[in-house]
Image (tube, rainbow, N blue to C red):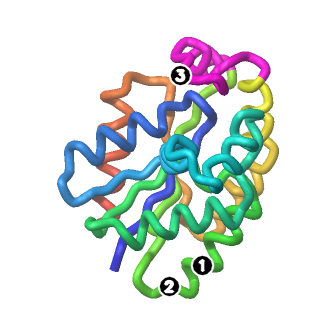
Amino acid sequence: MKKLFLIIGAPGSGKTTDAQKIAESNANIAHYSTGDLLRAEVANGSEQGKLIESFTSKGNLVPLDIVVQTIINAINNSPKDIILIDGYPRSVEQMIELDKVLQQDSKVKLLSVIEVQVSEEVAKDRVLGRARGADDNAEVFKNRMRVYTEPLSEIQEFYKNMNILHVVNGERSIEEIVSDMRNFIESKI
């Protein structure tokens, strides 16, 4: 059975870096960033990639069916049994759809949703400081923050009720955050 951990957090919260470091330090853990999976599709220039880019270039969410299928493909094709996926869910609809899919799949168990919490100010400083691509500017950041925060309380409530939400303070050093997350993940597996 594959053991799944979802890692959520604002743009710039460090969720992708944290998950990468945890996977690098444990040969049994695979890490997939929803953003990286979608960006890879855009980079390969496929029709699906062009469709994805039409949403991401404006800071909007990619349609539900495309994102869920991308994630399920990553889980099913993973050579490892412990999987970290960051950047998902980003909407109530994404959460509900993934929950439906997982309830029907006896080969994957969602063990926890880890929320990396940072203030909007810290998130903005980090995103604008890294300027990775065309979507890293103040206007797009503001929209991405709104897209992240609008459904957040409902997502938190859903996973709290399942008793699988774990919150981590993302405003410390990377080493401290990664250590906390690694210890928590290892306690669950």
Specify whether residue 115 is in view.
no
Residue at image coords 54%, 62%: 70
- Marks 2 and 3, how far apart in space? 36 Å
Task: Name the amino acid type tagged 1.
Answer: Val
Q: Indicate whether 89 appears above or below 18.
A: below
Task: Label the magenta part by its dominant secondary structure.
Answer: helix
- Marks 1 and 3, how far apart in space? 32 Å
Q: Which x, y percent locates residue 5?
A: 44, 59
Q: Which x, y percent locates residue 158?
A: 69, 64
Q: Which residues are magenta?
A: 121-139
Q: Is residue 116 magenta?
A: no
Decide: few, some or many residues near mark 1? Use Cα within 10 Å; few <14, some 14-19, many ≥20.
some
Residue at image coords 45%, 39%: 16
Report the side of 128 relative to 116 (left or right). right
Q: Residue beneath label 1, please?
A: 101
Q: Is residue 133 magenta?
A: yes
Which numbered marker is on residue 132?
Answer: 3
**Comes first in the chain, label 2 or label 3:** 2
Quarter residue 156 falls in:
bottom right
